[in-house]
Image (cartoon, rainbow, N blue to C red):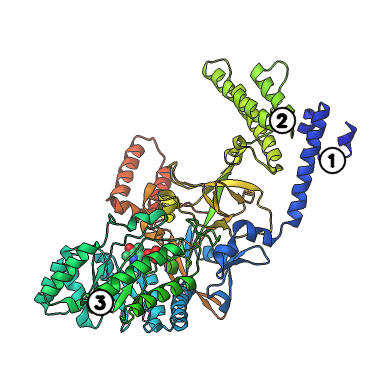
Amino acid sequence: MELEQNNGEITDFEQVAVKSLADVKIAKLENKSKLRLKEERKSWRIEDSEELYRIRGWGEPYFSINALGHVTVSPQGERGGSLDLYELVKALEKRNLGLPLLIRFSDILEDRIERLNACFAKAIARYNYPGVYRGVFPVKCNQHRHLVENLVRFGQPFQFGLEAGSKPELMIALATLKTPGSLLICNGYKDKEYIETAMLAQRLGQTPIIVIEQLEEVQMAIAASRKLGIEPVLGVRAKLTCKGIGQWASTTGERAKFGLSIPEMIRAVDELREAGMLNCLQLLHFHIGSQISSISVIKDAIREASQIYVELVKLGAAMKYLDVGGGLAVDYDGSKTNFHASKNYNMQNYANDIVAEVKEACEERNVPAPTLISESGRAIASHQSVLVFDVLSTSEVCTGALPSVSESDHLILRNLWETYQSINAENFQEAYHDAIQFKDEAISLFNFGYLSITERAKAEQLYWACCEKIQNLVRQQNYIPDDLKDLENIMASIYYVNLSVFQSAPDTWAINQLFPIMPIHRLDEPPTQRATLADLTCDSDGKIDKFIDKLKVKPVLELHPFKRGERYYLGMFLAGAYQEIMGSLHNLFGHTNVVHIKLTPKGYQIEHVVRGDTMKEVLSYVQYDSEDLVESIRKQTEQALQEKRITLEESQLLLQNYERSLQRYTYLSAN
Ligand SMILES: *Cc1c(COP(=O)(O)O)cnc(C)c1O
């Protein structure tokens, strides 16, 4: 075996394996790939991480990687300074803000609002549009007080308003929106109280617009108007026939849940005319769903809506506003395509198309151009929040040293061993099937009592060793046979993360939504592991095994080897819309800690801290009184003490732990 002797890299185990000439070849190959790995480590650059995690695609201009290999946040885009996210998390942890931690960057929120308004202003100038843009934020996207209050404040220069989709959201909007002239769009199902409250808001100097979503609401609005002597501003929501796309395609079309069909709209117009209130009808609204990834779908919808708008004018309504709803998408995978996790247009294209289409339709029919309204939620709220969580431990399929197999071992073990030895660049596909067959046989033998549990363990270890060896060969191929495509998934490590998917990223579970996830440090090291993420819940659905990739979804994420005793932090990005409020208390993991960060000339400032739920709090949501719980433990301890089953010290420790836990965060703590 002179071939290998001058190479100190070879392991004991491989020396055993080197038997035939074919084996020598394999050993050489393996050493080569080890050397390559070493080379890679040296030559892995920040740019490689940028490309791998596609951070430029989805992160610009807010997220990037610095020379230390840490993710940095530039909350004001290209216009302002930046923060090292890793250092920020470290500093926040020192302030006792444990992970998982949701960090909100108020400057990003401000930047999003400015951008959206700037895009519409530019489009209006470009097309000489004889009207204005007045955006609103749909509160349902993220109702948290600090966020909505900031949003209203940042929106003041643009008279940015709010959209409410329910009674509780109306309560928020009414109390929070104080910008003169900004709109308060009242959507959703309404009852008498909703309609009357919205109308009365006019008396406060607000500009509520009540959007009729159901035919019954017309008579309710007429009655409320008569009763209060208030002339409301009304809108109608149209059910467009144009096709939606993706997850929310069913939001449109004749059978959509919301809005009036054209015959219903005509009836609404007739009823309002009869009541002498047609002059109140001033707005046309539509919403074709969220995350519309294709610009052509948006264009089709605007075209249809513009025609309905001009027709309503012709019917005698005092039309003034056209509300194009939400749908402006977020490029989660950074591919700039019409893939569901992306979008094939930018904000400027979106504004241009709306402005141009509406202008054309109105000019053709000699109708004054409406004030344009959009209700972008996702596009405004997604980028501002980053969820940082850490890895608790990992699990690999291939662990421990390779077992030795001798002539006296069971035939099935010898077969697996021989398969292992024979694997080479020519036969790995065949060897893979052999390995699977032998492993299955081993399990059958075990089930019928012919194989001991230690023998079964050996068989499984040999099987995984085969898979690993084959995987290394597969990775060097340009073409991967179909039957080996799953190997990466089967071999993936599991990284256990301090997080509940159901609380913090419910859409990954409910609708397979993709969010960019990546380490926030060590980005100057090659991520040699391929992993799926498993959360803290004891639900097998509590996992993330779909990750962004170029034009497809990948089942594993490249991560760095987890080192015991060293923290490893991951970030989930663009999850500021919908996730927080739709999160649930599965396994009683509560709301996470939230911190609001604002950039200052010297660094940053913590604007608000919202502590996550304590155990006492989540237990109270399910009607447990923590005093009662403590009392129950106290009684049991007392009994045990009397029966001398527990010492006084033990009983004190137990009670102390129990009481202290109730005041604590529901997630695992690092120390
Ligand atoms: C959900 C919703 C929105 C927000 O949609 P995004 O795609 O998040 O911008 C806007 N308007 C209505 C009526 C909605 O239901």
Going by the image, does 13 lie left or right of 191?
A: right
According to the image, label 1 marks what residue? 8
Q: Is residue 313 above or below residue 445?
A: below
Q: Nearer the viewer, mark 3 or mark 1?
A: 3
Asked whether the beta carbons under mark 1 and mark 2 sit within 8 Å of each other, the answer is no
Q: Considering only order in the chain, which callout, 3 or 2, is on the residue closer to the N terminus? A: 3
Q: Relative to the observer, which residue lies in front, 574 or 500?
A: 574
Q: Farthest residue in the front direction?
A: 364
Task: Say which of marks 2 and 3 sits in front.
Answer: 3
- On screen, residue 473 versus residue 382, left or right, reads right
Q: Give the Cα separation between the discs numbered 1 and 2.
A: 27 Å
The residue that mark 2 highlights is 427
Residue 616's place in the image compared with 185, above or below, is above
Provide the secondary structure element on which disc 3 rests. helix
CB within 8 Å, label 3 to label 1: no
Residue type at the position of mark 3: Val
Q: Which mark is residue 313?
A: 3
Q: Is residue 570 visible?
A: no
Q: Secondary structure at mark 2?
A: loop
Figure label count: 3
Residue 336, numbered label:
none
Q: Residue at x 37, y 68 (%)?
A: 302
Whole-angstrom CA distance, mark 2 to mark 3, is 74 Å
